[in-house]
Amino acid sequence: MKGTEDMLTESYTEEWRHWHDARVDGLNAPYGWLSLISQDWLEDNVPQRIDGIPGTWLLRDGEVSYLPDPQGEAVFIDKQIATQPTHIPLGYNPNCGFGSSVEISYRDLEIELIARSTDGDRRIVGVRVRDPQQALLRHIDDIPTYPLSERWIVPMRFREDEAQLFPAQTVEQHVYETIYHFGQIETSMEGQDFIFDVNGKKRPDGYETIVHLRDASNGKTTYGAGRFVMMMLDEIRNATTLDLNRLVTFPCAVTNFVTCPLPPLRNRVPFEITAGEQLPVEHIEQRIQTFHG
């Protein structure tokens, strides 16, 4: 962080710093976003190998099975070695929302299925691999941020709608992620009024909401696909301010092996929001598409 503006309290600054440090620690975690090494999409009815992983993966009628090699090593599925063809259930996944609902591993690699949809609402499934050695190689010391400022703690009011699922377009062309729409927030900043859509996902401990914004800093000093503020649904229901000092960058800024949503069309700000995270020092200069279906 480059310095601190305004008369923010010491407790606010300290709380923000703890939150920011935890954010950096999360990226650097052994199986955090910096550990990703691949994202391969399965073709229907075609057994497929993943580099560095024994066995093959088969997508059929929207469901995935793991097929071990006749001889040699195999992966662990739900903490059991998969020596026979094994169906992998889809459901809640803490990393990708909807994907493999059981643990999958091989040696020190973690493997996860990600379930998405493509044009025409056809289910597609990818296999994503995390390697703690990659996390060590890509370790970052910090994420640069704008100076903290009271200017960017803005008033807000949440207008809640009945939660509804919808397919959100992602940074992967023709790939959609099913997420929730929870309502809108009304806010004002720099003398202008705005209404922003509030989307998110369900977690075991409740609903997570994100206010995903695109502003004039994107592609310059911040990530091109926007930044977001995250709050739990119970928190945003009672919130009277939106703290843009907590704008964070999606993991697609640092890896190609993700399917981050694009910002809602109405969530556009015509000026630069000089608050929150800036571009990580090591970031994706030009995105490489992994889905070619």
Image (spheres, rainbow, N blue to C red):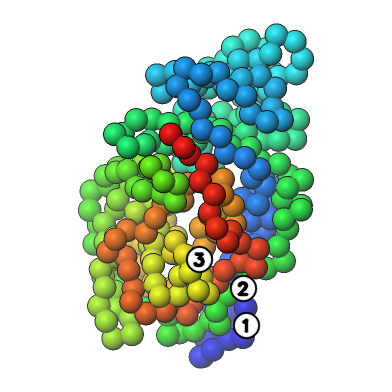
Helix, strand or loop status at disc 2: loop
- 75 lies left or right of 124: right
Residue type (three-letter) at the residue carrying disc 3 = Tyr
Residue beneath the point at 26% across and 57% down: 183
Taking the view exactly as shown, the residue that stands out farthest to the bottom is 6
Residue indicated by mark 1: 2
Residue indicated by mark 2: 144
Residue indicated by mark 3: 223
- 1 lies left or right of 268: right
Residue beneath the point at 29% across and 78% down: 188
Residue beneath the point at 63% across and 10% down: 84
Do the numbered discs 2 and 3 sit on residues whose CB atoms are within 8 Å?
no
Mark 1 or 3, which is nearer the eye? 3
Helix, strand or loop status at disc 1: loop
Whole-angstrom CA distance, mark 1 to mark 3, is: 18 Å
Whole-angstrom CA distance, mark 1 to mark 2, is: 8 Å
Residue 79 drawn at (x, y percent):
66, 24
Residue type (three-letter) at the residue carrying disc 2 = Pro
Q: Quadrant of the C terminus?
A: top left
